[in-house]
Amino acid sequence: MILTEQQLAAQRDTANRLVETGRKFAIAHYEIVVGCAEFADGVVWIADGATSAAAWLAERFDVEVCTVRSWISVGRALRGLDATAVAFKTGELSFTKARVLCRLATADNEAELLDIARKVRADRIGQALHAWSLKHEPHTNIDNRHRRARSLRSRTEPEGTIATSLRLPPLHAGVLDRAVEAQVMRRKLEREADGTWPTLAQQRADALVELLTANANHRFEILIHVDHEGCRFPDGTPLTDSAVTGLLDQATIRLIIHDTNNRPVNASDARRKPTIRQKRTIQTQQPTCTRCGTTQLPNLHHTTPHAQSKRTTTGQLEHLCAPCHRAEHQRHPD
């Protein structure tokens, strides 16, 4: 598309007005959140015979009760977090960040956490605050908080499907993800009835149902890295020391040697398929797909075709997800 300078300027003006509207919305959102908390502490909803303040407000706002509950919870938490409340009120902090911040912030750590919230994107704040908590909180406290937060909820969507929301401690979530991933890799990919290929999300949903209904005793490996930086899954998800310690009596411990540049090394192998040790090494070197960045469905790709090199070394292996791996071989068949 080719635009004139006038057309570009007009679109930029529209974009600037949109951003300004977003700021006004953020300020209005603050007033709603604080107002909901104040209303919940009153008696109007009790006098009207409502089951809860959230239910009374949800009916009049025409939103879900869980949404109002979240507003009330954040509004109450802001009463003890003055700096966070000001940042939210002025539009410096979005509701998304304020909601996450209120789960960990106290009067003592608010300034430090607020500084983190200002520096990261909204979609990364959860991971950033979790990394902070691993360094500043007893790991047993974190494990207890994870256990209290676990939940499974379902609701019916307008088209009739059931949407399920599952919240688990990182270790349990990692086991579930790995089990689903292993089942996806075992399944034969087939086209849908309309001739299209199923999406990765659809394949994962099918794999989960099969795991729950087939009752098959499939084996898979859970890889946890433990080094000077702490404990984590290959995708970078941090784990508490106490959670990993509880696995030691049933885990297999492997040593991965690193070179002077802190890169994992491994010997070469004449076989075509990578060994288990080589797979672990590559997962340490390249935790995500080198093409699209996903951590799902990892495959190892020979950067130099095995037909030419006649061997498999870690220096000739590349982490690709299954879709990128398939696309690579379609472009460059061995």
Image (cartoon, helix red, strand yellow):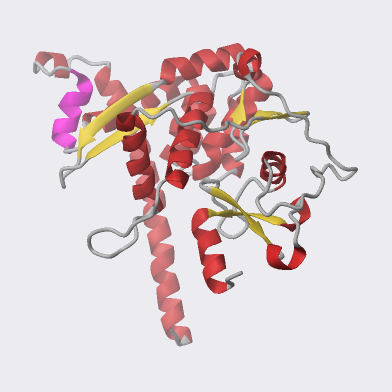
Q: Image quarter for residue 206?
A: top left
Q: Is residue 59 covered in magenta?
A: yes
Residue at the image point whose x is 15% and y is 19% from the top: 45
Residue at the image point whose x is 36% and y is 36% from the top: 208
Q: 198 above or below 327?
A: above
Closer to the camera, 142 or 271?
A: 271
Q: Which residues are magenta?
A: 52-61
In-image side of 64 versus 311 (left or right): left
Percent coordinates x, y for residue 164 in the rendering: 29, 34
Residue 166 in view here: yes
Residue 138 in view here: no
Q: Quadrant of the C terminus?
A: bottom right
Q: Quadrant of the N terminus?
A: bottom left
Closer to the camera, 177 or 169?
A: 177
Q: 148 above or below 75?
A: above
Q: Image quarter for residue 109?
A: top right
Percent coordinates x, y for residue 203 in the rendering: 37, 48
Q: Image quarter for residue 236?
A: top right
Percent coordinates x, y for residue 270 in the rendering: 76, 53
In-image side of 87 versus 38 (left or right): right
